[in-house]
Amino acid sequence: MSAEPSPGREPAGHVLILGGTTEGRRLAEALAADPAYAASYRVTNSLAGRVGAPVLPPGETRIGGFGGAEGLAGWITAHGVTHVVDATHPFAERMSFHAAEAEALTGVPTLALRRPGWSPGPGDAWTFADDLAGAAAVLPSLGRRAFLTTGRTGLHLFAHLTDTWFLVRSVDPPQGPVPPRMEPLLARGPFGLEQERELLARHRVDVLVTKDSGGDATAPKLTAAREAGIPVLVVRRPPVPAGVARAESVDAALRWLGDGGRTL
């Protein structure tokens, strides 16, 4: 950090972590573990509340939405937030744009913390789609027994595919319109390579559908698919809003906070 805090004083800074990801939790843990950061920053973790029994990170926690960009800006102002770290899921596009709009409204510096995405390697057979609707359109041409790992939201976009069998893995049970031939699998990562190999073989999966979430927790499914010669349908990430500072690691986010949100 750029300066040591004075002992006995209340933290001068207040970091709002828009979390719900491994990176958001690890950032909160790093801020709590380092005495200099802990003395300099009060930390509030904001979780969307879409997952039952979430793993709570260190610091204060609030659950639920803010009511759009203006609501977020109002909360930032009312609670004296000095820095915002958008560590939401890479596909939480609406929240990221709300954070960018709130930065414009309040002037409070905002950082988008995004783990690096995945890239195909030798032996991979990847097809890309821009969104879930695009993935649903191309899926029937790639296989008939799909392992769908895009979460429970957006399942309605696959509900019309009556000839495709789906194994749907999610943390919480799927709701709303779902594909008629579907087996739910409730599980929370990380997932090991041997586990993924066995899953693909047991369910005779012939196509894997995934978002480009990045990270290590769910990457073994890509290796298992490559080994089995199974095509992978990858939904591309939405872009980070223009003008927002970006970091790909917790260490980079800590450097940004240590410098007062000015540089990476």
Image (spheres, rainbow, N blue to C red):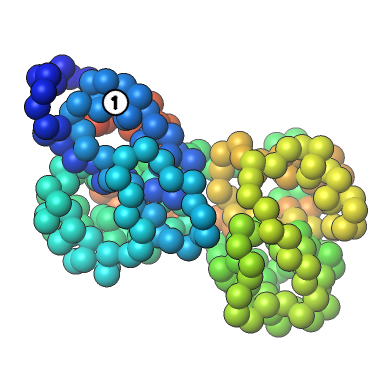
Residue 123 visible to the viewer: no
Q: Nearer the viewer, residue 57 or 15?
A: 57
Name the side, left or right, on which 183 lies relative to 38: right
State whether residue 113 is above or below residue 232. Answer: above
Q: Residue, x 64% and y 41% (percent of image)?
A: 190
Residue 183 placement: quadrant: bottom right
Give x and y (percent) for residue 114: 43, 42
Classify the position of the C terminus by image quarter. top left
Classify the position of the N terminus by image quarter. top left
Q: Nearer the viewer, residue 238 or 194?
A: 194
| Kind of residue indicated by mark 1 | Arg
In the picture of the structure, the residue carrying the numbered disc 1 is 255
State whether residue 61 is above or below residue 190. Answer: below
| SS at badge 1 | helix
Name the side, left or right, on which 260 lies relative to 254: left
Residue 184 placement: quadrant: bottom right
Q: Residue, x 48% and y 57% (percent of image)?
A: 91
